[in-house]
Amino acid sequence: MLQQLTSLFKDQLSTDPTVYCMDNYSVYQLADGLRFGIESSALTGRELDLLNLIAERVVTSISTDLTYWRQRLELPVAEESEPFRMIHFLFDQLDERITEDLENLLTSFFEAASIFVPLTTNRLLVIERDELVSEHDLNDLFTALQSDFLTNGKVLIGQRRSHGDIATQFRLEQAALRHLPLSRVERFLPAVTRLALLSQPVRDELTSRFIGPLEPESRETIDAFCRANLNVSLTAKHLFLHRNSLQYRLDRLTEQTEIDIRSFEGAAFLYTLLLLA
Amino acid sequence: MADIRLEHIDKIYSGSAKAVDDFNLHIQDKEFIVFVGPSGCGKSTTLRMIAGLEEISGGDFIIDGKRMNDVAPKDRDIAMVFQNYALYPHMNVFDNMAFGLKLRKFPKDEIKQRVDNAARILGLEEYLERKPKALSGGQRQRVAIGRAIVRDAKVFLMDEPLSNLDAKLRVQMRKEIIQLHKRLETTTIYVTHDQTEAMTLATRIVIMKAGLIQQVGSPKEVYDHPDNMFVAGFIGSPSMNFLTGKLADDGLFHVTGTDEKFEVPEGKMKVLRERGYTSKDLVLGIRPEDIHAELIYQDTKTAHRFPAHIEVSELMGAESYLYSKVGDQAFTARVDSRSHVEMGSNLDLFFDMTKAHFFDAATEATIR
């Protein structure tokens, strides 16, 4: 698709964020998440209509804050020193008037410190800081807004990170969102485990991020803990360790990966990656 | 006013069979239509296509003469109530009910008037300042219904709105929904898998199975005159009993694998013979309440006497369910519980053959 568009618009099309983030570009996102911009002056009304059919129009940012966050999420690496969790919303059939109402609704729902980033006309991102809304409340919100806005959609609750590379995390979670079934509010771990099973590049990325840096001792701990049905006493026995030593190893593992291996979803995620590595 | 027509509606998900297949229905203004059927029968999918939450793969969806297939959901003048209460957790009851109107830019005075009116109808006046967390399940569901009422939409869509409530509350809310429909007279389409809800709420029931409509009719029509074995078995609790057998030359219905012969009333016999069912496989259907234990039936010519061995007897209060078998074919009788029947006892039961239904064993269609 992009190749065809490039041959049509030539130099007026760019896939470089530093170029298309300029005001004179109309920015679009393809189904696989790839973004591109076309000089607005090169587009006729008919071409705009056609583009809206094949891609999502990326919301043109006006505030400085929004421009900052949009660029930050597109950088190859963007280290975040404060804690964050991203909530990704994707809707069908939203027009711009509704997007504004939706933004107001979400602003009133999330904590004041949260950052609200409209990505495309159908796609919204909320970055939470310290105060996190509950999954239950998010489910209620999502169903209520489905009945008010009469639109289908899906929500991904991203991973809670104490710090780290927000741009890479954003790309991974957006990819997981794409593979979610409609009408679902999904947590990070099940969504990303599903994605790891579906996509080889994501599998490679995840194994190198989560399993690659681990020492053999940590890998052995994941394997033994899962084989013992997450039973600490049994795992300690199998590994010839004192129970407290195993607890220490599990704590360290959680610290390193930011995944709680004591939870079923965390264990399933790490075990799947270990098997695929 | 809302006159709704669904003409040859299909829903096909990519790479799978039709989820809804050639759905045809004309819903008249003020009707309360219930879609009922087991999980995966296409009832919720049809409702979501009407709401615009699912795309219609084929056919025409028409409201008041206007084709709505490509009309945006928000412009269809439809209000929907979901299964899980669908309330904004951070808003109080008033704001929850008012939100849909604020979205549609209604003036403040009118919003207040409509919300107050809905709160009065639903008995929520004293809860308007409360957040959803401080409400009971029934109150929350009432607010969810209130959110739909205030919109004063042409059509209400309700997707299993009572299934998250406990049994007692469900009965109470069912009554309230009937009263509400009587008062507002809004055309309503209601989805449920519960045949009791369907029977008590509907002006007409649409029974579905595997994406296909099995029968459309008033609760009494579908109960008394089911079109096929699926409808006969789905509507009614306990379900209709089915006994397989053959209509022999002697004019009696011989139950498969036994010496048991049921006399078939003349009228029904005539139909079966005319349709060529002599010596062909048949299914006899009889509702549990048409099998009696009272001795008064022994002198009734059309009642077939069957010496039953009662395997299980369940006392339900005013009535008892007796479980027995003809050969290896199980059946249930629903009898008056005044005379207690012990488990393991033998008892004569009387099958009222004037109430019997006959089905083609191959097609499962009712023989009429």
Image: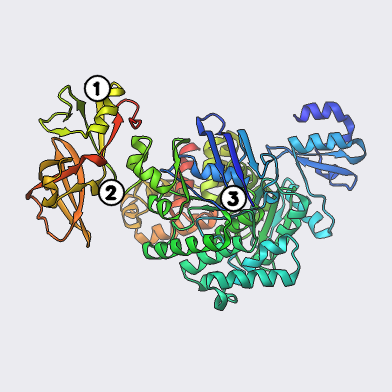
Q: How far across and down, in percent of the image, does residue B343 sit? A: 10, 53
Badge 2 marks a residue whose secondary structure is: loop
Q: How far across and down, in percent of the image, does residue B319 sit? A: 21, 58
Q: How far across and down, in percent of the image, does residue B337 sit? A: 17, 59
Q: Residue at x 29, y 45 (%)?
A: B239
Q: On the image, which quarter does residue B67 sit in?
A: top right
Q: Nearer the viewer, residue B79 or A168?
A: B79
Mark 2 near mark 3, Cβ–Cβ under 8 Å? Answer: no
Give left or right: position of A62 versus B262. right
Checking the image for residue B280, the label placed there is 1
Q: Residue at x 59, y 75 (%)?
A: B128
Q: Earlier in the sequence, mark 2 or mark 3?
A: 3
The chain under label 2 reads B
The chain under label 1 reads B
Q: On the image, which quarter does residue A247 sit in?
A: bottom left
Give left or right: position of B20 versus A147. left
B365 w.r.t. B80: above or below: above
The residue type indicated by label 3 comes to Asp
Q: Earlier in the sequence, mark 1 or mark 2?
A: 2
Q: Which residue is mark 3?
A: B29
The residue type indicated by label 1 comes to Lys
Q: Which residue is mark 2?
A: B238
Same chain letter for marks 2 and 3: yes
Mark 1 near mark 2, Cβ–Cβ under 8 Å? Answer: no
Badge 1 marks a residue whose secondary structure is: loop
Q: Earlier in the sequence, mark 3 or mark 1?
A: 3
Alpha carbon of mark 1 to alpha carbon of mark 2: how far? Answer: 28 Å
